[in-house]
Image: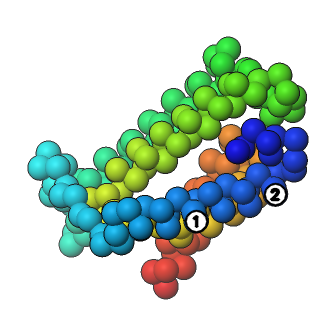
Amino acid sequence: MFRHLYDRDHLAQVLATFGVILFLNEAVRIAWGSAPLSIPIPDVLSGSIPLMQGLLYPVYRIAIIVAGLALAALLYVLVNHTRVGMLVRAGSTHPEMVRRLFMIVFGFGAMLAGFAGIMVAPILSVEPGMGDSILILAFVVIVIGGIGSIRGAFVSALLIGLVDTLGRSF
């Protein structure tokens, strides 16, 4: 389906992706229901560490931060220092050259989304549509960071995450 959208602008691709997400969320609700499932925190990562007097931070959340930073570093190296990354960067300006590679990149992105879902599953419940609220923030990150800019996406993700978290706490 997405192959037919390669020649269109980014807005058409984003809207089609959003439509597919809505369709798949409803298909999952029909097939398995909408009851949330919970996954326990692994025993190794349970507990908290003191950050300062009276302030404890869960070890599992630190593990999520470390995993996110490690994946960001891995993706940076992959995109900026490998031949595959060179092809992906070239494909952002000349997509007709690397259509098959973009299918693999799309699959890799889906794998990363699954990894993020499984990492956050012990904190939140697993349910259809669990990523919808994050999806809107991801679109904002892409718009602010710039399509095709890994560094811009990273900086804007940090900025949006801080603004969102501070806004919710105040």
> Residue 104's x, y, as percent?
61, 29
Residue type at mark 1: give it: Leu
- Camera sees residue 121: yes
Q: Is 160 situated left or right of 64 in this image?
A: right
Task: Classify the position of the N terminus by image quarter.
Answer: top right
Taking the spot 24% from the left edge, 64% from the top edge, the residue there is 38
Q: Is 29 situated left or right of 74 in this image?
A: left
Q: Which of pointers 1 and 2 lies earlier in the amino acid sequence? A: 2
Quarter of the image where one finds residue 33: bottom left
Quarter of the image where one finds residue 67: top left
> Residue 85's x, y, as percent?
67, 23
SS for tag 2? helix
Query: On residue 11, which mark appears?
Result: 2
> Residue 99's x, y, as percent?
75, 28
Query: On residue 22, which mark appears?
Result: 1
Taking the spot 31% from the left edge, 47% from the top edge, the residue there is 63
Taking the spot 62% from the left edge, 57% from the top edge, the residue there is 20
> Residue 12's x, y, as percent?
81, 56
SS for tag 1? helix
Taking the spot 70% from the left edge, 25% from the top edge, the residue there is 100
Residue type at mark 2: give it: Leu
Quarter of the image where one finds residue 135: bottom right
- Camera sees residue 90: no
Marks 1 and 2, how far apart at CA: 17 Å
**Rendered view: 75 above or below 51:** above
Identify the image's colour scheme: rainbow, by chain, secondary structure or one colour: rainbow
